[in-house]
Amino acid sequence: MSTCPFAFYYRRQIAAAKAKTGNTAARSCVEITSAMITTTNLCKRYDSEAGPVVALDSVNLHIPRGQFTAVMGPSGCGKSTLLNLLAGLDRPSSGEIDVNALRPGAMSEARLTEYRRRVVGVVFQFYNLLPTLTVGENIALPALLVGSPERQASARAESLAARVGLAHRLSHRPHQLSGGEMQRASIARALINNPSVLLADEPTGNLDSHAAAEVLSLLEELSEEMETTVVMVTHSREAAAIADAIVHMRDGRVEDVHVAGAAG
Ligand SMILES: Nc1ncnc2c1ncn2[C@@H]1O[C@H](COP(=O)(O)OP(=O)(O)O)[C@@H](O)[C@H]1O
Ligand SMILES: [Mg+2]
């Protein structure tokens, strides 16, 4: 029995890959879908009373598996909009998003909820921890939401809390923590279901330089340990310096992609 709610999508993807190549080897599918994230002519328009706002204007991105990508650009250029679309928190106006061979933009609400819980982990600038839950409960919550037994979810939450340096804070409430500690708890929460993709929107934007450096090292180390693809919006040069690639955006468009180590 398959327990993966996306087995249907993967089967369809494999069938499509076989049809395209005429090759029945499973490898052909892996090659075709080796990008973790692809966006094709991705557009997002907001219709407000003041008139339409084009937040994303035909964004084409190709992010390989395991890559750590920083997204930079002036305020209002569409960075959060892009992240929200990848996270399945909002839907595109047109164009396509592929994340690990899934199409969140075209999913039913029920499948999109599953996608948000299992495929992506999200870290926000202001942590978004639930104030009435303890740190341990906050971290364990996404595991409980996908049906993990309580004991298993707490054990995993404890081990992740220890990994982010919060073993001694498990029973504390978020308001008893420093900003850096809250962000480390939110990283643990984002990773508890082993997501394929970690999305972080200015994760160090509210932290002092010491806490920011700690959060960045954790993101870098954990994404490597857990083989997670990371897309991080940031204004910080230090943050961008740890990335494998930097996507520069302006006015809803990708202006330039700079790959670390490449000439120029
Ligand atoms: N819900 C919304 N309704 C109307 N306009 C929006 C909405 N969300 C974002 N925008 C507009 O879309 C553009 C991109 O916003 P955003 O993605 O938040 O930019 P960034 O994260 O780069 O600062 C901005 O002009 C912003 O005002
Ligand atoms: Mg933003």
Image (spheres, helix red, strand yellow):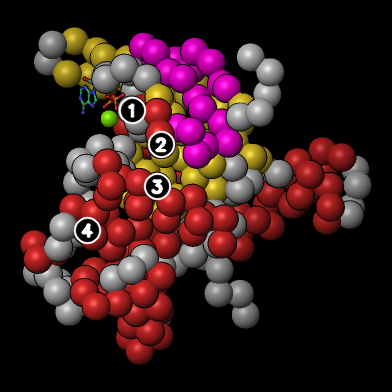
Q: CA distance from mark 4 to mark 2?
A: 18 Å
Please say if the residues under marks 3 and 4 sit with CB atoms less than 8 Å apart. Answer: no
Q: Nearer the viewer, residue 142 or 206?
A: 206
Label pair 1/2, CB-CB below 8 angstroms: yes
Position of residue 177 in the picture relative to residue 23 (left or right)? left
Distance between mark 1 and mark 2 Cα atoms: 8 Å
Q: Amino acid at mark 2?
A: Ala
Residue 203 placement (x, y as % from top left): 31, 43
Residue name at image x 50 percent, y 56 percent: 221
Q: Amino acid at mark 1?
A: His
Residue bearing mark 3: 216
Residue with the mark numbered 2: 239
- Where's the C terminus, which quadrant? top right
Q: Which is more toward the observer, 46 or 109?
A: 46
Position of 239 relative to 95 (above/below) = below
* Predominant SS of the magenta segment: strand
Q: Earlier in the sequence, mark 1 or mark 3?
A: 3
Percent across and percent down for residue 205 are: 25, 37
Q: Which residue is mark 4?
A: 182
Magenta highlight range:
240-258
**N-terminal-most mark, 4 or 1:** 4
Residue 114 within the segment the image draws in magenta: no
Do residues under tags 2 and 3 come within 8 Å of each other at their CB atoms?
Answer: yes
